[in-house]
Image (tube, rainbow, N blue to C red):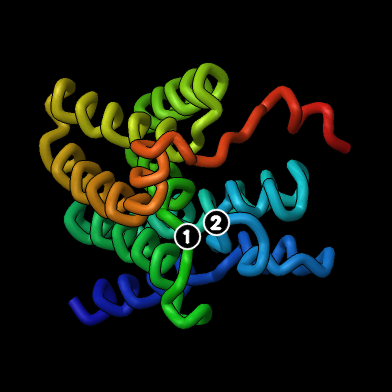
Amino acid sequence: MAFEISWMILSYLVGSIPFSYIIPSLRGVDVRKIGSGNVGGTNAIRAAGPVMGIISMTLDVLKSFSMILLARFFGFDLLWIYASGISAVIGHDYPVYMKFKGGKGVASTLGFILAINPFIGLEFVGIWLLFVLTTEYVSLASMVGLAAGAATAFATGMWYFGIVLSLLTILSVYRHHENISRLIKKKENKMSIKNLIKQK
C-alpha cells in the first residue's frame, strides 16, 4: 500500500512538469503572457509555433502514459493504475511547480486513454481532428472527444474505465469553463490547422 501511495504522489509530481511552459521558454517565450495565458499545448502552439507546441503536447501526453505503463510493469492492481493516471492529470491541471496554475488536462488525459485503451485514444484523436478542421475550435473538439471516449468505454463494457474517464472529462470541462463562456458568446479563439502547416 505504501508503495502504491508513493507512486500516486510521484505520478502527480511527474504530471506537474510543465512541458508546455518549459519548451516554449527555450525560445524565450513565456506562454503565461501570450494568448490565453494557459500553460497548455494549444497556447504553446500559438505562442511558440507548431513545432515547439507539438513537442510540448507530446511530452504532456507522455507524462500520464509513461506513469501508467510503469504502474502496470510493477504489477499494480487496476485501481492503482487508474489512480496513477488520475494523479498525473491532476498534476498537469494543478502543477505544484507553477503555483497550481496549469493546463486543461486534455493532453495528459489522452495519455491516460492511450495507455489503457489505444483504440479509444485513436477515436479521440480522430474526433478532435474532425472538429478542429470543421470548426477550428480546439476547446470544443477536446471536450467532445473526451466525452465520446467515455461513451465508448461504457458501450464496450469497460465500466470502471468509463467512470474514470467521465470524471476526467468533467474535470476538463470545468477547466474549460472560460472557453465555454466564449463559445456561447461566439468569441472563442480559433486555430486553423491549415495555417499551422504553412508556418515554419
Instruction: Find the residue positioned furthest to the front.
Output: 185
Q: Nearer the viewer, residue 5 or 193?
A: 193
Where residue 72 appears, as percent x and y from the top left, is 34, 53
Q: Secondary structure at mark 2?
A: loop
Residue visible at 74% across and 32% down in the picture: 196
Can residue 4 be seen at all in this image of the molecule?
yes
Q: What residue would you read off at disc 2?
A: 40
Q: Are marks 1 and 2 in contact (CB under 8 Å)?
A: yes
Where residue 16 appears, as percent x and y from the top left, is 47, 71
Where residue 2 appears, as percent x and y from the top left, is 22, 81
Where residue 102 appears, as percent x and y from the top left, is 47, 67
Q: What residue would you read off at disc 1?
A: 103
Quadrant including the C terminus: top right
Q: How many marks?
A: 2
Which residue type carries mark 1?
A: Gly
159 on left or right of 44: left
Q: Nearer the viewer, residue 107 or 138?
A: 138
Q: Is the residue 56 above or below the residue 33 in the image?
A: above
132 on left or right of 91: right
198 on left or right of 4: right
Mark 1 vs mark 2, CA separation in Å:
4 Å
Q: Is the residue 126 above or below the residue 66 in the image?
A: above
Instruction: Find the residue positioned furthest to the right.
Output: 200
Residue visible at 58% across and 47% down in the picture: 42
